[in-house]
Structure formats: C-alpha cells, structure tokens
Image: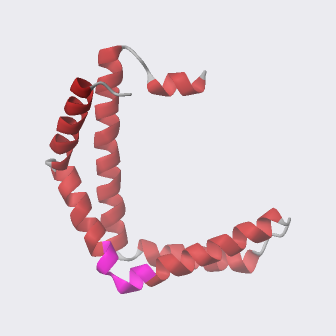
Amino acid sequence: MVPDFVKEKALALAVAIQETDEYKDFLEKEDGLKKDKTAQELLSKFQEKQREFISKQLNGEVDQELLGELTEIQAQLNRRESVVDFLDSYNRLINLLNEIGEIISKQIEFDFGEAYRS
C-alpha cells in the first residue's frame, strides 16, 4: 500500500505533467486523430489485416500478398497528417515521462531498467 504522503506527491506530479506542453499537445493531437475518419478506417483495416497476418504466421504460413497490403496501409497511415502529428506528440510525451522516471531513479539510486535486465 502506498503511504498517503507518497500518494499525494504522486498526484501532484501527475497534475504537473498535465500542465506541460507535451501533455496538452498530446491530447490535442489525439483528438485530431480520433476525428480523422479516414485515419480511423485505415487503423481498423490495419489491425484487422495484422490479426489475419499473425494468425497465418502462427500456422506457419507467410502470406506475401497480405504483407504487401499491410505495408501499403502503413504507408497510407504515414501520409496522414493526423497520424504523423499524433505519433510525434506521443513520442514527445513518452520522452518527458522517461526523463521524469530517470530523475526519480537517480534520486532514489535505483535503476528500474537495470532491475528488469538482471
């Protein structure tokens, strides 16, 4: 169980993160992606084809035609401004959160990544 004083600090950190440009931009770009009907259709189609491809792969099949379809859908997604903007904002937010994690790790002298590599 997390002590109350630690929980309070964690919640304060969450609020501070929500006030960053990275977080605000992420929410804005996420909303833009959700409103892009074409991108949503492409994402659904990509996920469907991906499931089909993985299913075939698990059965020992390599469907080159399906792989080509996945590659084409991915290319179409990469040309959508809403997708590019979302991924860029997502990566900036992840970088911020990683930096925060590194600050915490350094302060408490505990490398979370190292703990999982052992």
- The majority secondary structure of the magenta stretch comes to helix
Residue at image position (18%, 49%) is 18
Would residue 81 be visible to someone looking at this image? no
Q: Which quadrant: the C terminus?
A: top right
Q: Position of residue 66 (x, y in %)?
A: 70, 78
Q: Tell me the quarter of the picture where residue 36 sits.
A: bottom left
Depth check: 75 or 38 in front? 38
Number of marks: 0
The quarter of the picture where the N terminus appears is top left
**Residue 34 vertical position relative to residue 15 in the rendered view, above or below:** below
* Display coloring: secondary structure
Residue 83 spot, x, y in % from top left: 37, 70
Point out the stretch of residues depicted in magenta. Answer: 33-40
Relative side of 58 to 79, left or right: right
**Image location of residue 41, percent across then percent down:** 46, 84
The residue lying at 34 percent from left, 28 percent from top is 2
Q: Position of residue 108 (x, y in %)?
A: 33, 16
Left or right of 69 in this view: 75: left
> Where is residue 35, by image quadrant?
bottom left
Q: Is residue 108 above or below residue 63?
A: above
Res. 25 in view: yes
